[in-house]
Image (cartoon, rainbow, N blue to C red):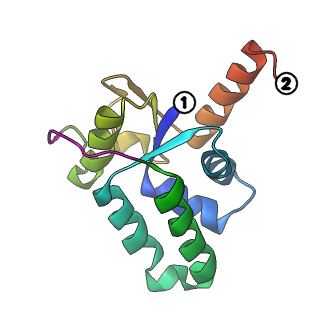
Amino acid sequence: MTRVVFDTNIIVSALLQPLGAPAELFKLALNGSIQLCVTGDIYAEYEEVISRPRFQRIGEISAGALRAIRDRGFWVRPTESVRACSDPDDDIFLECAQAAGAEYLVTGNLKHFPVSWKEAQIVTPRQMVEILAGSEKEAGLS
C-alpha cells in the first residue's frame, strides 16, 4: 500500500472544498486505498489549524476528520530531527515521511520543501492523483 504524508494545507483544503484533488486524496486515505502517515506533532498541527476561528464553519466536519485520522492513520514516531525545509515548521512532515518510509509527501506548498526526501517524492495533490491513476492503469484496475 502506498504510504503518504499530508501537509496540513491538504487536510484544510479537503475540508473546505469537497470536490478537489485534496478531498479525493483524503477520501482515499480514509477508505484505506492509501496509508496516511501521522505523528503526534503532525496531528497536533492539524488539530490546531482546523480549529482556528476562520475555519469555524467546518467545525463538525473537522472533528470527524480528526477522529478518522486518529483512528485510521499509520502512526509513527520519528527517531531523528530534520532541518531541510525553507519553513522550519514543515520539517515535521519530512521527519514523518522518513520514519514511516512514505513514498510521497503531498503539499500545496512545494517551494517550502526539497524536491524529495529519502524515499519520498514531494508532490502536489494533482500530481498525486495522477500518480495513483497511473498505478491503477498499470495494475489493470481502471
Q: What residue is disc 1 on?
A: 2
Front position in the image: 8 or 110: 8
Other-residue count near label 1 (Cα within 10 Å), few / some / many at <14 / 14–19 / ≥20: some
Q: What residue is disc 2 on?
A: 142
Q: Is residue 12 left or right of residue 114?
A: right
For marks 1 and 2, give the CA distance: 17 Å
Magenta highlight range = 75-83
Quadrant where the N terminus lies?
top right
Other-residue count near label 2 (Cα within 10 Å), few / some / many at <14 / 14–19 / ≥20: few
Locate residue 93, reporting x and y percent: 33, 46
Front position in the image: 123 or 29: 29
Q: Which amino acid type is marked by label 1?
A: Thr
Vertical placement of 115 versus 21: above or below?
above
Q: Which amino acid type is marked by label 2?
A: Ser
Locate residue 107, reporting x and y percent: 47, 45
Residue occupying the point 59% across, 72% down: 64
Front position in the image: 84 or 41: 41
Residue 83: name its quadrant: top left
Are the residues flagged by discs 1 and 2 in contact, CB closer than 8 Å?
Answer: no
User: Would you say the magenta stretch is mainly helix, strand or loop?
Assistant: loop
Q: Is residue 115 left or right of residue 16?
A: left
